[in-house]
Amino acid sequence: MEYLKRLWQISAFLYFCAFELIASKITTPVAKAAGFVFFFPYRDLIKLPPPKRLRVAFERLGAVYIKIGQLLSTRVDILPPEFIKELEKLQDRVPPQPIEELLSSYPFIKKYFEEIDPFPIGSGSVAQVHKGRLKSGKEVAVKFIRPGVEGEVKKDLKVLKVAVNILSSFVPFFREFRIPRIVDEIERMLLSELDLTTEAAYAELFRKFSEKEKNLYIPAVLWDISDPKVLVTEFVSGKKLTEEIPMSPEERKTLAERFVNIVHRMVFELGVFHGDLHPGNIFLLPDGRFAFVDFGIVGRLSPGTLSQFFFFSVGVMNRDPDLIVGALKRIGALPEGINENLLKREIMTFLDRYYNRPLSRIDAEKLFYEELSTARKFKIVLPEELVILMKTIAHTESIARLIYPDFRLPPILKPYLKKLAPKVAAKELRRKVLNLVTAYGELIEEAPELIKRASRKEERSQREIFYGLFLVGIAVLLSFSPKLLILYLPSVWIFNKLLPKEKERG
């Protein structure tokens, strides 16, 4: 009974949030009135503007849906900017659980601590963070998963998936933008946040990266006293970027450029990036380094997707629609039957609005949102982690402006991409060649048998076998010793000439 009640409640919020879309498919007044009668307790939502209506619905649905709304605020490829801005206002206004309840749920933690501040420094729908002091005197941050939240998350996600699947059957928007798939991605992210060992592992990865990045500090994880539901790290004491920082304009500019370069190196060189970079997760240490905390949302792209994002970015910077559309196609973002020529013309029209401006006059975040509005027009749905990445890069500009108000991203990004282009292209070529070697590996093993079959069957051409082995040879040389191609290609040409000519098949 409780399940059906929750399904009815969630369906009511979805109905009124998608009312304009649903109403366009309902032609009779009686059918429209039926929805208002069935979902009567929530009809007041319809009085609000659609963006605010969606935010209020998430807030009224409770803690789990506040978190879902926050994650949905990253889906700028689906929702218009006014919806994104409204969802970004969602805050985890969840009353903290008393520290006594947390310690009774995780009693093992008591033996390590001298004291834990009963007032949390952060309280969310899934977890809350307290400052503490170990018996050794070391100050730490302790993140607790709220007891019982895992069952609540799984229950609400199950109901949400049922409601979305029902709506997808008669609301085209839910099908065209593959909303059930988006809900699956949100489910994966939420369940991942419930296991703090994942966050700890990423924190460790970024800490190793910080050893080579002199301008970055990542607090160490105390593995001996952490587990899947409790994460203990060093406590970071520094200034937030929203605080007053006594610096000259030139020092501020340099500091902003350092911050942006850290993010770019994470993305393009490490291939892993902080997915929730906002001023609350960034501190400025007394020695001038930046400290990043809270790795609950982290993006990791496959080498292929990262390469295509790089080419997409270069395409935007160089006003090349072929490069942009090609990258989108290779990552599977284009829907079936799309008019590529029309898409390219739309991209050119969009880029023309920015191309003739000086780089110092281009607002990267505004460009980003307008770029995604073009994607929505053509029903382009990007991989979830790619959207988080694009938003992270766009947000680096707005964060850098907290340090230096006149900062603009493009003058820094374009030369960085240009410098990195040969390295990325070579890495992508090597990856593809190695894939080719793997694909032809079986052919090498089967070559003797194939040649025997070719000699027994007229329909099997010796030259087909020859060309297959020729490709294998090129793949191997490109992977391990490209210089030998100078000798390999002439040798293959001579060998080809020596092969007996095949008889014409009549």
Image: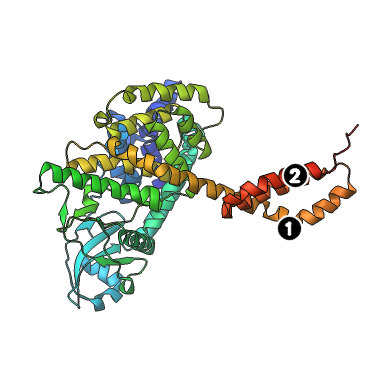
Q: Amino acid at mark 2?
A: Ile
Residues 284 and 462: in front is: 462
Q: Which mark lies nearer to you, 2 or 1?
A: 2
Question: Count of labels shown?
Answer: 2
Q: Is residue 325 visible?
A: yes
At a point 34% along the width and 42% down the height, the residue shown is 416
Q: Mark 1 sits on what residue?
A: 445
Residues 157 and 304: in front is: 304
Please indicate whether residue 451 sits to the left or right of residue 420 in the image.
right
- Residue 279, x across and y down, in percent: 22, 48
Image height of 175 relative to 306, above or below: above
Here the colouring is: rainbow
Residues 68 and 485: in front is: 485
Query: Which one is earlier in the sequence, the residue at label 2 or at label 1?
Result: 1
- Residue 335, x across and y down, in percent: 52, 32
Q: Residues within 10 Å of mark 1 (few under 14, many from 20)?
A: few
Report helix, strand or loop for mark 2: helix
At a point 37% along the width and 32% down the height, the residue shown is 317
Q: Mark 2 sits on what residue?
A: 494
Give the label on residue 119, or none: none
Please indicate whether residue 424 sits to the left or right of residue 458 in the image.
left
At a point 37% along the width and 24% down the height, the residue shown is 350
Q: For the residues marked 2 and 1, what is the alpha-carbon distance in whole angstroms?
A: 24 Å
